[in-house]
Amino acid sequence: MLLAEKGIQKSLLNAINQNKPLFQTNKKPNEMKELSIENKQEYLNEHYPFSEIPNLSDKNRCIHCYEIITVGDFKVFKGDSGFEFICCPNAPECDGTVIDWQPIK
């Protein structure tokens, strides 16, 4: 199991054990707590939900704000359940998360 999968599994189990919703779909980043991430590449290596982990220098387009972003500028917000969302660098104005990023070719 990848480190990211272990982290997601831990967050899900914590939410279930506390009878909390798994994802805060009704909350936007400005309603959650922003976390300070010291080593962003390490954070991505451990928490990125997809198999191909991007480099911090990679460029993507966020489909929520339509801006071209640098992956390393991402922000992390923590929901009430403890789940950590990797968000668009333009958060909280933009509510895009990592799933909303399209690679620039």
Image (tube, rainbow, N blue to C red):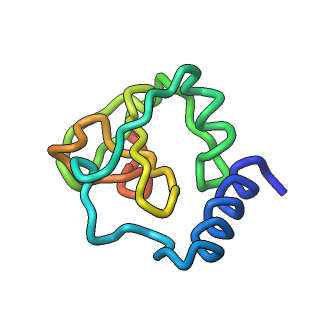
Relative to 54, 57 lies left or right: left
Residue 36 image-quadrant placement = top left
In depth, the one of 45 and 28 nearer the eye is 28
Q: Residue furthest front?
A: 18
Relative to 19, 17 lies left or right: right
In depth, the one of 24 and 57 nearer the eye is 24
x and y, in percent, of residue 74 in the image: 39, 34
In depth, the one of 68 and 26 nearer the eye is 26
Q: Residue furthest right?
A: 1
x and y, in percent, of residue 51 in the image: 67, 52
Image quadrant containing the C terminus:
top left
In depth, the one of 27 and 65 nearer the eye is 27
- Residue at image location 49% in from the left, 63% down from the top: 81
Q: Against 47, is 23 above or below?
A: below
Residue 28 image-quadrant placement = bottom left
x and y, in percent, of residue 17 in the image: 65, 74
Image quadrant containing the N terminus:
bottom right
- Residue at image location 70% in from the left, 60% down from the top: 10
The total number of labels drawn is 0
x and y, in percent, of residue 57 in the image: 47, 22
- Residue at image location 24% in from the left, 41% down from the top: 91
- Residue at image location 62% in from the left, 68% down from the top: 12
